[in-house]
Image: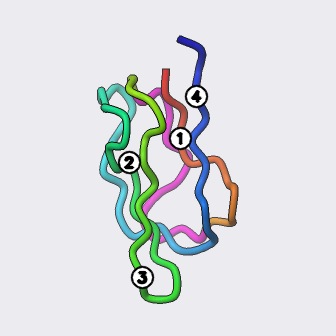
Amino acid sequence: MAAQTVRGDVAGRVWKVLVKPGDRVAADDTLVILECMKMEIPVVAPVAGTVSAIFVEEGQEVQEDQQIAVLV
């Protein structure tokens, strides 16, 4: 499988990072939770795979369409 980039759908603050590099995830597993306008927005894995990299940390502000993680 080719590397799959995971991007955020909204701008907001990273509330919780639920995975780390090396973790195996299933499609639709939540990787990160963003907080936007007091709502929790999950960033989910589009496909099953292994987390290769996480580019955000808790408390960080992120922009819409910012790279969040890579799955392989």
Residue type indicated by callout 3 = Met
Residue type indicated by callout 2 = Leu
Residue 6, compared with residue 41, is above or below; it is above
In this rendering, the count of numbered labels is: 4
Residue type indicated by callout 4 = Gln
Which residue is at a point 43% across and 40% down the rendered structure image? Answer: 45
Residue contact between numbered discs 2 and 3, judged by CB atoms under 8 Å: no
Badge 4: few (under 14), some or many (20 or more) residues near its Cα, within 10 Å? some
Which badge, 1 or 4, comes first in the chain's sequence? 4
Q: Is residue 68 left or right of residue 46?
A: right
Seen from the viewer's position, the closer of residues 71 and 46 is 46
State which quadrant residue 8 falls in. bottom right
In this view, the mark in front (1 or 4): 4
Residue type indicated by callout 1 = Ala
Which badge, 1 or 2, comes first in the chain's sequence? 2
> Gap between marks 1 and 3, in whole Å?
21 Å
Badge 1: few (under 14), some or many (20 or more) residues near its Cα, within 10 Å? many
The residue beneath circle 1 is 69
Task: Provide residue 21's location: percent of width, then percent of height.
Answer: 39, 32
Q: Is residue 12 left or right of residue 21?
A: right
> Gap between marks 2 and 3, in whole Å?
16 Å
Mark 3 residue element: strand
The residue beneath circle 2 is 31
Task: Give the magenta-colored segment's residue range.
Answer: 51-61
Mark 1 residue element: strand
Residue 38, compared with residue 59, is above or below; it is below
> Gap between marks 1 and 2, in whole Å?
8 Å
